[in-house]
């Protein structure tokens, strides 16, 4: 299976101008109460990017956790902002629910603490399984046990299914794992390459790469099965399709210009349009879908190769890319949280791959430390 890696993009016209606030001011908050819940809740609030956790005598806000309930007050006025009792079972699940409610109450934006991330998990050479975890790296559940190589997971919009590429029968097929029923079904297993499936925002259609007619080309198919339709017909290699938020366009990777770059095509085909020019190697787009009312613009994440290293950056809408994650490691495989503000990506150092969260507004990075073994190719799931 061919692996393309990616770079962070914003585009004009379809996506709007680059508009990430650099001077975003966090609210200070203190958290007191049941120790086990408090520690998880503090971490959730930090990861939200909206809060700086401080002591009670320094903070603007105070969250008090007692007996399955959470009270949030303004420390200066003692005004209650939120008071809620929870029936949620489990320490971590309870803290995540509280965190999302606090984020929504204070910022008006939905939190991400109750979301999940699918990824490719490897604990021994040559074996890469599909796995799912909480957004903070805890509660890992391995979905497959094929003892083969899996890759490129993508969530259905309802959060119940994951399409992924698998070498379960030695050649790359596209499968779908149902997390509710534990069943799997084959989406594409033609002779040759079957890879890179992505669901439309309404979940009804897939975009994927197939070589069944000779060359790796873009196709669409019904998510319920069949009705394959070819979109491209070139001598180059097309891969890594991702749907636009409105489901009318597909961004993808093609080496039609000589090196891998990001291109755009309509859902029914037509004349492709090249998006990126510089740097000379841009791959694996991931298109953000901020919810209605969000103050974030829609963005496309990709990875570029610069100076022999992969790094993550922002496309400026004028064919150029500005890096936002560029260090001594290889940074690749970005995928967006449903809030359109955070992404998770894979960072590789000394031949070991780990997952990191990035807040694109503050540029803060944080490793997900709970994961043992190698983790790569993350896919952030939808809100539940």
Image: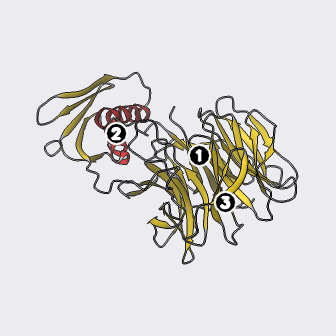
Q: In this view, does 316 lie above or below 224?
A: below
- The number of numbered badges drawn on the structure is 3
Q: Residue drawn 19% across and 45% down?
A: 55
The residue tagged 3 is: 253
Which residue bears the numbered disc 1? 244
Q: Residue furthest left?
A: 76
Mark 2 vs mark 1, CA separation in Å: 33 Å
**For the residue carrying disc 3, how many other residues have a C-alpha within 10 Å: few (<14), some (14-19), or many (20+)?**
many
- Identity of the residue drawn at 64% across and 39% down: 200
Q: In which quarter of the image is residue 90?
A: top left
Q: Mark 2 points at which residue?
A: 41
Residue at image coords 49%, 38%: 115
Residue 147: image location, x then y, percent: 74, 51
Name the quadrant containing residue 324.
Answer: bottom left
Quadrant where the N terminus is found in the figure: bottom right
| Marks 1 and 3, the one that precedes in the sequence | 1
For residue 110, side relative to residue 253 (left or right): left
Q: Is residue 154 above or below residue 323?
A: above
Q: Does dot 1 land on a helix, a strand or a loop?
A: loop
Q: How far apart in space, not on screen, are marks 2 and 3 (Cα)?
A: 39 Å
Seen as rendered, the residue at the extreme bottom is 307
């Amino acid at each position: 299976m061919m692996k393309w890696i990616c770079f962070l993009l914003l585009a004009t016209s379809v996506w709007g101008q680059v508009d990430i606030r650099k001077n975003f001011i966090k609210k200070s908050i203190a958290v007191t109460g049941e120790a086990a819940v408090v520690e998880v809740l503090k971490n959730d609030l930090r990861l939200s990017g909206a809060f700086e956790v401080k002591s009670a005598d320094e903070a603007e806000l105070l969250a008090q956790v007692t007996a399955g309930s959470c009270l949030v007050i303004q420390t200066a006025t003692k005004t209650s902002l939120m008071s809620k009792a929870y029936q949620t079972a489990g320490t971590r699940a309870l803290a995540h629910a509280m965190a999302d409610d606090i984020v929504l109450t204070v910022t008006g934006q939905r939190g991400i603490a109750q979301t999940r991330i699918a990824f490719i998990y490897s604990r021994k050479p040559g074996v890469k399984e599909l796995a799912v975890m909480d957004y903070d790296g805890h509660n890992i559940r391995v979905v497959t046990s094929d003892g083969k190589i899996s890759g490129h997971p993508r969530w259905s919009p309802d959060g119940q299914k994951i399409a992924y590429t698998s070498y379960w029968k030695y050649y790359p097929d596209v499968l779908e794992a149902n997390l509710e029923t534990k069943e799997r079904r084959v989406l594409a297993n033609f002779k040759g390459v079957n890879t890179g499936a992505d669901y439309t925002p309404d979940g009804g259609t897939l975009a994927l790469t197939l070589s069944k007619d000779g060359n790796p080309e873009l196709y669409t198919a019904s998510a319920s099965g069949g009705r394959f339709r070819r979109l491209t017909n070139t001598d180059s290699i097309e891969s890594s399709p991702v749907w636009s938020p409105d489901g009318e366009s597909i961004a993808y990777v093609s080496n039609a210009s000589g090196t891998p770059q990001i291109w755009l095509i309509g859902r029914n085909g037509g004349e492709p349009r090249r998006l990126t020019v510089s740097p000379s190697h841009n791959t694996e787009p991931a298109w953000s879908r901020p919810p209605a009312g969000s103050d974030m613009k829609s963005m496309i994440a990709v990875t570029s190769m610069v100076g022999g290293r992969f790094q993550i950056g922002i496309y400026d809408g004028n064919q150029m890319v500005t890096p936002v994650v560029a260090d001594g490691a290889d940074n690749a495989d970005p995928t967006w949280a449903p809030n359109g503000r955070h992404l998770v990506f894979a960072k590789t150092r000394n031949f070991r791959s780990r997952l990191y969260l990035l807040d694109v507004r503050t540029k803060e990075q944080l490793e997900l430390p709970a994961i043992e073994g190698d983790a790569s190719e993350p896919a952030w799931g939808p809100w539940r």
